[in-house]
Structure formats: structure tokens, C-alpha cells
Amino acid sequence: MTEARLKKIGLTRFDPSTDLGDPEGILDAFVQCLQEGEHVEAQQILASGLKHMNKSHLSKRYGIARRTLYNLMDAKRSPTLESVAKVWHALRQESLLSAKAA
């Protein structure tokens, strides 16, 4: 998406180099894309964030199958709402834990 288009619809560019380690940043960018109807970009943001997170940790702590996490990172697949909700919850909890630790 061009910078002009982003500015026109009120979105900001998602900078993976600074935001991928931040669960709150991932959630914010994900929601922003969904609000604008950009489901492909929303899935890409979620996938990019998951690539930089410990899938074993998320799987054990939140009861999400590792296969589900890897499937969410596959652009050829369409995740179920249940899978997205589980990952959303996990990222939200991780964000809250990060905020408490800071």
C-alpha cells in the first residue's frame, strides 16, 4: 500500500524492525488493518509477529497447538476465527505481562 493511500485512510506504516518484538504493537497494527477491511495485511502482521515469538512458549502457556501457530503464518491458509481469537488472547496476555515487567 502506498504512503499516500495509508495517509488518506488514516493508517500508519507498520515497521517490523521495531514493532515485531512488541505484542501491543502487533495487536494495534492488526486491529487497525481489520478496522480498514485489510484482512490480508492483518494476517501478514499477525504472521510476522508470530515468526518472532517463541511458539513453544505460546503453545504451552495458552493451550494453542503449535501447528495452529505455524498455520497462521502460512499466507496460503485462511485462519479460523477461533484460531485468531486464541492468538489474540495470547498476544494480549503477553502484552500485559510485558507492561507489568517494564
Image: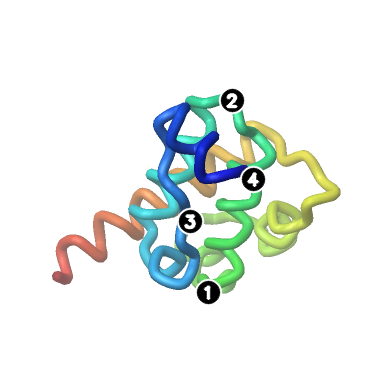
Q: Which is closer to the viewer, label 3 or label 4?
A: 4
Q: Which is closer to the viewer, label 1 or label 3?
A: 1
Q: Is residue 38 left or right of residue 54?
A: right
Asked if the residues shown at circle 1 and circle 4 are in contact, with their CB atoms under 8 angstroms apart, the answer is: no
Q: Is residue 49 above or below residue 54?
A: above
x then y, percent, for residue 51: 60, 69
Q: What residue do we see at 36% from left, 64% from top?
A: 22
Residue farthest toward the right in the current orientation of the protein:
76
Label 1 sits on what residue type? Answer: Asn
Label 3 sits on what residue type? Answer: Tyr
Q: Which mark is residue 43?
A: 4
Q: Which is closer to the viewer, label 2 or label 1?
A: 2
What residue does disc 3 label?
62
- Measure how far apart labels 3 and 2 are at the Cα level: 28 Å
Local packing at callout 1 (Cα closer than 10 Å; few below 14, some 14-19, many 20+) is: few
What residue does disc 2 label?
37
Residue farthest toward the front in the current orientation of the protein:
4
Which structural element holds mark 4?
Answer: helix
Q: Which is closer to the viewer, label 1 or label 4?
A: 4
Local packing at callout 4 (Cα closer than 10 Å; few below 14, some 14-19, many 20+) is: many
- Measure how far apart labels 2 and 4 are at the Cα level: 11 Å
